[in-house]
Image (tube, rainbow, N blue to C red):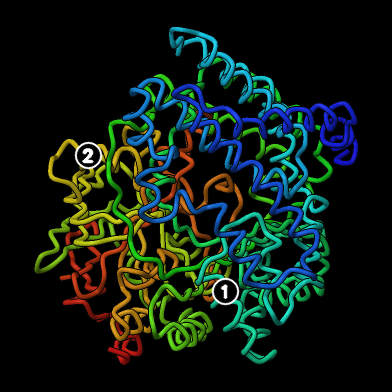
Amino acid sequence: MYKEFKERYDNNPDVCNELQRGLEEIKKFSEVDNNKYSDYFKTIGSFITRAFEYKELQNNLENIDFDTMLRANNELYMDIHKDNYNNSYANTEYTCNIFGKELGQVLSYIYVYTRNYIDWIINENNYIINQTNKLILDIKNKLETSEEQNITEIIEVIRKYHLDVIEYRIELNLNKIFNPVTSEYYRKIIENGIDSNMKYLFMYDKYIGDAEMKTARFLSKMSDEQIIDIATTIVEGFVNGYKRDGKDITKKSNVRSTYQIGEELIVKKVLEKLKVVNITEFTLVPLCISQFKQYEYDHEFDTGLYYDKDYVDKNLKLYEEKCEKYKDVLIKFAGPVFIETFGQIPFSPKVKDTNIRLTDEQKGLYKNLQNKNMQILNRFAPRSDYSFTIISLPNPEIGDKFEEIFGETCKVNTLDNDKYERIHQKIIDILDKADFVHVKGKGDNLTDIKVKMQKINNSQKETLFENCVANVNIPVGEVFTSPRLTDTNGTLHVTKVYLDDYLYKDLFVVFKDGYVVDYNCKNFETEEQNKKYIEENLLHPHKSLPIGEFAIGTNTSAYVMARKYDIGHLLPILIAEKTGPHFAIGDTCFSHREDLKVYNNIDGKEIIARDNEKSILRKTNPDEAYTNKHTDITIPYDELDFIRSITSNGIELSVIENGRFVVEGTEELNEVF
């Protein structure tokens, strides 16, 4: 099917011929210098030309030296890198200053959109290159031949373009995410392309910076045994997820692996070990460490330029058709393996009024599209049928002690599951007695929240909390539940937290009956700016979110590591959530698999708190059951006064006091402090 798709679109002779004619026209942009748009289109033409030249260098890689490839790679990103971005057409402030706000937003969008050529060229997505060539030429013609700027007409051209290419993009993206045949290019890099001079790094369609090169160089010095140990931890986490939930892994055959460029040696061993459990096909998603966060922030909502009901309706119709077409591929999906990275300096963006924003109507359309597409996908690749695993490793941006921190992180990622499972059970036994759990901060931390527990009907067979070791979610160390929303009230406060690549200073979130009713932070000068920042990055596209999870992290070793190297603010939430109590806003941890019964290993009790008042709506109003978000917010131990389990009789049973565990049988957790 994918072969037919490629032949219909990308390998179609008419498309390829038209593409070449369009490129010849674009190359002529450099010859014209007689109007106010000349430099803009010259810059676009020059970029597209360089992108094609880079592909030629890749094709001749064995004859090109490392420095030449590095220079050619970095030149593709030079105009959005560091201070260069200030005077780039990608910067909405710069472009709007030249062309006015309305036209400037449109032209900045087009300029940024053409950066997709790097990906398209390397992956030979000829159809969309051809369509985008025509879009650029059409807009250029309209601007240069019209005395008046008809911005509405130009936006309509863009809107029509996206309606025209939506079928292609949906089918392409579905294949890139789920169909292993699309990853043959990356698989060859992993299996055969890793070389000692690291030139293979330039086979990707991504920016290659110091972090990627240093990571590859560092891993190349590690022994096979060390690499295998990391891969074993990852694969065991994945397989144990199937065992924990009683799922049959033999029915599955393909995994999607997301990894950081430079980590190929680890990925190679992961793939080899997955083959041992008959996972033989792989969709690979390589990522680079972003050096362009302000650029990405500025263009986060560029879809607002063309997003409307026609677009959403067509998207939904085609997405269902394509899922049906590729149902035999989707049903074999075994789940994702995420190898994430941490160490980047926290980012607090500059807010600009020149950036495109979604209207309230568009936010509603976006939310509807998310929900409907998730429902469609869940029919063809049910979340209850597959598992996942996720691990995070430091990258060189974490500082001079990168190699030492990498080693310490590997130790944290391989702590004794049996030991923690035994200790967790002691904590769960106390928490299962709770009507409420009261969490209170100390010092500058103003957290004070009472979390309502769900009701246990049979204490011999039921429990509220999952005993979470390093199955799927690496490293070990938390017990978690889905709270009852009604009667969950209070304030969550963290003095500094790094969530989804964004820094929040003094983040306050107020809950009433389990939902966010107020929020603020101190990133910007005005309350309006701070609230908008939270709305667009933490809540989007929702006005409010429920508490989907309450958990107590128990990985005190990770906490001590963070303090030793002063990297607490750099820890990914995957590790940070294990270093104190945390609350997730959004969906529960059992999202889309609430009806799958799960049991703790030690006592064999069923974890019954899989639903809340939001997720149960899936039975009556599925469009309102899920938020498609889950963001963990952690209070570190040193900001914690206490966590107490309060019974229905008002008896208070302490779990943590003054940042230390006090439940009998948990003493080992405090030994590392």
Disc on res. 531 = 2
Q: Amino acid at mark 1?
A: Met
Q: Is residue 33 left or right of residue 557?
A: right
Q: Quadrant of residue 162?
A: top right
Q: Is residue 564 left or right of residue 519?
A: right
| SS assignment at label 2 | helix
User: Can residue 624 be seen by looking at this rendering?
Assistant: no
Name the residue that disc number 1 marks.
213
Q: Quadrant of residue 437?
A: bottom left
Q: Amino acid at mark 2?
A: Lys
The image shows residue 17 at horizontal and vertical percentages of: 85, 29
Q: Residue at x 25, y 81 (%)?
A: 662
Q: Residue at x 73, y 28 (%)?
A: 22
Q: Reading the chain from its start, which is encountered first: label 1 or label 2?
A: 1
Q: Quadrant of the C terminus?
A: bottom left
The image shows residue 405 at horizontal and vertical percentages of: 43, 84
Crowd around label 2: few <14 · some 14–19 · many ≥20 (10 Å): some
The image shows residue 528 at horizontal and vertical percentages of: 17, 35
| SS assignment at label 1 | helix
The image shows residue 240 at horizontal and vertical percentages of: 65, 71
Using the image, determine if residue 593 lies above or below residue 570: above
Query: Of 118 and 652, which appears nearest the observer?
Result: 118
Using the image, determine if residue 325 lies above or below residue 463: above
Residue at mark 1 to residue at mark 2: CA–CA distance: 38 Å
Q: Residue at x 37, y 57 (%)?
A: 632
Query: Of 574 and 288, which appears nearest the observer?
Result: 288
Using the image, determine if residue 603 lies above or below residue 128: below
Crowd around label 1: few <14 · some 14–19 · many ≥20 (10 Å): some
User: Can residue 184 be seen by looking at this rendering?
Assistant: yes
Query: Of 39 and 378, which appears nearest the observer?
Result: 39
